[in-house]
Image (cartoon, helix red, strand yellow):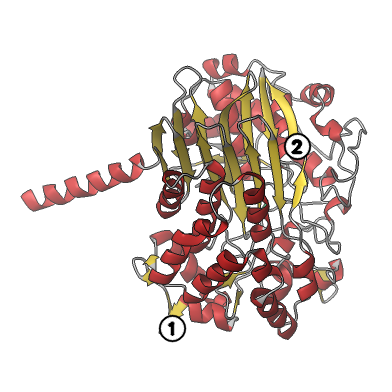
């Protein structure tokens, strides 16, 4: 009996310790990521004298080692930075379609085939992560370049214990890894994928990271790594060449800035759809007294917000693409357009949205689980929201021999053909068709919220289209519902993306809500998770930071 009790106590303590890792408060700086080792590496960077940008880059590089199924140097990222003097830096490190890429290369037997855009040599866009890290570092980092790699190299060389989740994801993709020699060699031992608790050493990745640390991005884009990637692609039916890698460029963009009930919302522009649709959904929500609705019942709040999500995602499918190739109307975030759309929302019944809306045709000047989100802020005044990805878990499932790099499958974020959904069930139009050197549309939404000109909140998420809706809910729960950051992240979420016409409710929602939403005419689906979100909030009175890492995964928020 005593042994059982002690065991129970131990299990309970472990559970509490784990759940407490998800929230933290601190005065000087805060970090929130999906992996404790990445959060710890970022904290070390801060205690070594780095700022929030150094810490975010350190976290990103470390996540590529300990959480490589979500993000890494074989993928891309968006980095949104606010500097102490109020400058916004928007670094686009999205992957790019290789020069020889065509829509036809994803057809087999005359039909679009998402197997080709999801697995293998054609699935990868030219990776942008390393170029983006370097650009962010040059713009706002303060520690020497190589220091950001130290922890990641140490962990890659010495190994770390595989988590239950990592082991499960590996096991379920075993047959795919067996198609690629270096993937098989990395993840499979004696016929089995690595088990939970097993130590995972990545010598080749350590050596690649050392090269980039010592020689800079050249080592990746023009040196040994570029040669190994291009040779493998050439031998395996891919189209990515040394030239694609040598000419890749991270781009500085202008952020999408909108407002919500007296707050300024700074979001990421195309090729992300995040900033545009977070802004658009919030604009529609602003037309309704949501805090009042929520006080009455969660049903009314959930219904209105879900309808706003549905209307915005219909626009996403038609209007959004890489703004260097297609004209994305700025009018999507016009308040007048949101007012028109919001008039379509019926408080008593779910509406049918047949197609996209017609925003004011104002175009900007030309060009100006899976996935992970990193939030960092410091008292000097640097705030960083960074979302990084190799797309779906383990990307294209290809590990490039000699590098340890897991390649992305971001080509699947293009619309292969009308009516053909990608891995997230998303449809797209001409605006997001495959074109040489174009960037596939993303939902990644690194966001910074300002109040009276001062940063108050940063939030972002993983989860494909659920990123956009997680960010909207995070902001609304703070601004409309006056929840604490912890509640804003922990509360059950919901999601609507227009097509398929389903309202996804996390299973932890009240069963009663599910019934009431059905009565309003929604087609309701239960889901285990609607996004993995990290948030940092700064209390305007005390100046204290509160950080939350989403308890839906085993991450960590911590500060100093
Ligand atoms: N790869 C998912 C996204 O960028 O939205």
Q: Which mark is residue 276?
A: 2
Looking at the image, which is closer to me, 399 or 219? 219
Q: Nearer the viewer, mark 2 or mark 1?
A: 2
Looking at the image, which is closer to me, 298 or 59? 59
* Residue 546 % position (x, y): 44, 31
Q: Which residue is mark 1?
A: 191
Is residue 480 shown left or right of residue 500?
left
Q: Which mark is residue 285?
A: none
Looking at the image, which is closer to me, 288 or 69? 69
Q: Is residue 207 above or below residue 426?
A: below
Report if residue 307 is visible in the image.
no
Q: Quadrant of residue 335?
A: top right
Report if residue 257 is visible in the image.
yes
Q: How many marks?
A: 2
The residue lying furthest to the left in this view is 2
Graded by Cα atoms within 10 Å as few (under 14), some (14 to 19) or many (20 or more), the crowding at tag 1 reads: few
Q: Quadrant of residue 132?
A: bottom right
Is residue 345 shown left or right of residue 145?
right
Q: Any atom of ligand 1 within 8 Å of the CB at mark 2?
A: no
* Residue 42 % position (x, y): 46, 49
The residue lying furthest to the right in this view is 361
Is residue 266 shown left or right of residue 62?
right
Q: Residue, x 41% and y 54% (percent of image)?
A: 37
* Residue 533 % position (x, y): 53, 42
Give the structural element (helix, strand or loop) at label 1.
Answer: loop
* Residue 320 % position (x, y): 81, 45
**C-alpha span from label 2 to label 1:** 46 Å
Q: Residue, x 44% and y 33% (percent of image)?
A: 28
Give the structural element (helix, strand or loop) at label 2.
Answer: helix
Graded by Cα atoms within 10 Å as few (under 14), some (14 to 19) or many (20 or more), the crowding at tag 2 reads: many
Q: Residue, x 84% and y 45% (percent of image)?
A: 318
Quadrant for the C terminus in the image? top left
């Amino acid at each position: 009996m005593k042994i059982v009790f002690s065991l129970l106590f131990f299990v309970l303590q472990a559970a509490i310790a784990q759940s407490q890792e998800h929230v933290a408060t601190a005065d000087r700086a805060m970090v929130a990521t999906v992996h404790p080792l990445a959060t710890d590496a970022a904290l070390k960077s801060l205690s070594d004298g780095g700022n929030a940008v150094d810490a975010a880059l350190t976290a990103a590089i470390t996540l590529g080692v300990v959480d490589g199924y979500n993000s890494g140097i074989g993928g891309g990222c968006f980095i949104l930075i606010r500097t102490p003097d109020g400058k916004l830096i928007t670094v686009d490190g999205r992957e790019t379609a290789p020069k020889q890429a065509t829509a036809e290369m994803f057809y087999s037997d005359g039909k679009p085939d998402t197997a080709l855009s999801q697995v293998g040599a054609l699935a990868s866009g030219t990776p942008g992560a390393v170029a983006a890290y370097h650009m962010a570092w040059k713009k706002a980092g303060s520690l020497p370049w190589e220091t950001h790699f130290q922890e990641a190299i140490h962990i890659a060389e010495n190994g770390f214990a595989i988590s239950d989740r990592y082991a499960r994801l590996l096991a379920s993709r075993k047959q795919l890894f067996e198609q690629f020699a270096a993937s098989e060699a990395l993840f499979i031992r004696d016929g089995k994928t690595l088990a939970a608790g097993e130590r995972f050493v990545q010598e080749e990745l350590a050596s690649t990271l050392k090269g980039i640390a010592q020689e800079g991005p050249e080592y990746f884009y023009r040196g040994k790594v570029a040669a190994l990637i291009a040779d493998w692609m050439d031998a395996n039916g891919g189209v990515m060449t040394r030239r694609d890698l040598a000419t890749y460029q991270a781009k500085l963009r202008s952020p999408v800035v909108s407002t919500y009930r007296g707050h300024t919302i700074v979001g990421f522009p195309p090729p992300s759809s995040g900033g545009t649709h977070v802004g658009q959904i919030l604009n529609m929500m602003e037309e309704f007294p949501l805090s009042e609705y929520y006080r009455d019942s969660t049903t009314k709040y959930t219904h209105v917000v879900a309808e706003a999500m549905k209307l915005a995602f219909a626009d996403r499918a038609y209007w959004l693409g890489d703004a260097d190739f297609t004209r994305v109307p700025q009018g999507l975030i016009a308040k007048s357009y949101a007012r028109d759309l919001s008039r379509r929302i019926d408080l008593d019944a779910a509406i049918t949205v047949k197609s996209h809306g017609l925003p004011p045709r104002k175009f900007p000047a030309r060009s100006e689980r899976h996935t992970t989100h990193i939030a960092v802020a410091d008292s000097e005044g640097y705030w960083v929201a960074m979302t990084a990805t190799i797309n779906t878990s383990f990307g294209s499932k290809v590990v490039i021999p000699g590098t340890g790099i897991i390649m992305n499958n971001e080509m699947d974020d293009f619309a292969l053909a009308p009516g053909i959904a990608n891995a997230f069930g998303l449809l797209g139009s001409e605006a997001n068709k495959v074109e040489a050197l174009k960037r596939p549309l993303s939902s990644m939404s690194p966001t910074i919220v300002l109040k009276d000109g001062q940063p108050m909140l940063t939030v972002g998420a993983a989860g494909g289209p659920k990123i956009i809706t997680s960010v909207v809910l995070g902001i609304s729960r703070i601004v409309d519902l006056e929840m604490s950051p912890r509640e804003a992240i922990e509360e059950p979420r919901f999601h609507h993306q227009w097509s398929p016409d389903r309202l996804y409710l996390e299973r932890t929602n009240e069963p009663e809500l599910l019934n009431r939403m059905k009565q309003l005419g929604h087609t309701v689906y239960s889901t285990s998770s609607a996004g993995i979100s990290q948030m940092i909030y700064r209390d305007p009175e005390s100046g204290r930071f509160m950080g939350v890492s989403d308890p839906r995964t085993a991450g960590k928020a911590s500060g100093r």
